[in-house]
Image (cartoon, helix red, strand yellow):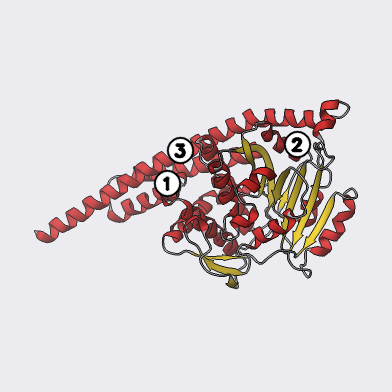
Amino acid sequence: MSAMNSIGMSLHIVDIVVLVFMVLGAVGTALTTAQVLLAAGFLFRRSGRALATARGRGASGTEESGQRREDKKGRPVVTIIKPVSGIEDGLEMNLESFAHLEGPSYELIISVADPDDPALPIIDKVLPLFAKGMVRVVIGGAIRMDNPKVERLAAAARHATGELLLISDSNVRVSNDYLAATLAEFDDPRVGCAVNLFVGDGAASLGAALECLYIMTFVVPGTILAACAGVTCVVGKSMAISSRVLQEIGGFEAFAQVLAEDQSIGLAVARAGYRVALSPVLVHNVVQSRAISGAVKRQVRWGKMRYSFSRFRYTGEFLCNPLPLLLVASTLSAVAGLSPVSECALLTGSAVAARILQAGALIHLTRAKLPRLSLLLVPVQDCIQAATQLVPYFSHQIDWRGFRTRLGRGTQILEPRRAANSGT
């Protein structure tokens, strides 16, 4: 009798667990659908206004337009800083896309650490596309910092003359109207920092497709949701900041010992009393070739960084990935022989369809260049994401660009960089 009671109790507990996961999965499916609708509204509502302003700035033949193209001392309005380390996918075309930007005057500073960097021949190849005096290559010239990207930003900032600084990663490709439309956010004097949405583009391998889907189905809607909720969320593929505001928060050097310098800068800007604006102007993060292991490691690294800022919000992210929750419920129900097997299967199938439709809608809205067949990988990517999201609860070690370290709160780098065989 005691054994029967124990079995009955175990089945009752499993039944409760199944029910909880079914509810969470259903809520998550509704939430992710709402996120896509919110993203659609955000992109339609704000992109029209931003682009209209950009066209006004790029127009010629008016005194107002002429005044906006350079500051009162005749210096470039914007300094674009592009840290480069190694050969990223599509590097040559990525750099070329910055040669003929419309709108205010600008200068480009390409910052490279090593005179033997393999990207330098490609950089030399595109330099003739820029007008004389518009582009400068800075090699070395910085004190060694725990975050090598911040090291390159600090080295470049010493040569910057613009009143606005625009940080752009080397794997970013932009359209001609990108600059003026992004800077339209600074028409609001309360804005100290503006961040661009970005999409994964150009996938030509399975790993690259998975990474692009992760960006499309999780990063894009999550960034928009955070902005609409008033939560500072900065992913610095492309971000602009007032040089005056940057000095107020301590310059790039103040972020030398954090790994997520982009989010840390955004939080510092908000603490200083300025607004962090999300620009609807899309940039393309070119990901052509990526090993599956590399894509998975990147998701783990990004997860660990988000976890270090807020464990509570990070845990809430599981609701933004409902399919694995329903798969767990279906598996437990089938193994235990519980009655809601059919209900679980129906919910799981609905979630699969919903997630594929959501991804398709976001690809259409953002005009990302992803093969349509990659939509069939959405359930696979969701399961990979769920697995990688568990890792930060057990490990704080980070592998990044050949270095390994350990993270503290707010992505504080707790150990000196040491060599690691990583590819991430």
Residue at position x 30%, y 45% from top?
Answer: 19
Tell me residue 69's x, y (percent): 82, 35
Judging by the rendered image, the residue that carries numbered circle 2 is 180
Farthest left residue in view = 1
- Is residue 177 in sight in this rendering? yes
Dot 2: few (<14), some (14–19), or many (≥20) neighbours within 10 Å? many
Q: Nearer the viewer, residue 122 or 262?
A: 262
Residue at position x 65%, y 39% from top?
Answer: 366
Q: Given this view, does label 2 or label 3 mark the residue nearer the observer?
A: 2
- Secondary structure category for the residue under label 2: helix
Residue at position x 52%, y 60% from top?
Answer: 412
Q: Does label 3 or label 1 sit earlier along the sequence?
A: 3
Q: Does label 2 or label 3 sit earlier along the sequence?
A: 3
* In this view, 172 is above or below 43: below
Q: Nearer the viewer, residue 4 or 94?
A: 94
Judging by the rendered image, the residue that carries numbered circle 1 is 316
Judging by the rendered image, the residue that carries numbered circle 3 is 31
Specify the amino acid type for callout 1: Gly
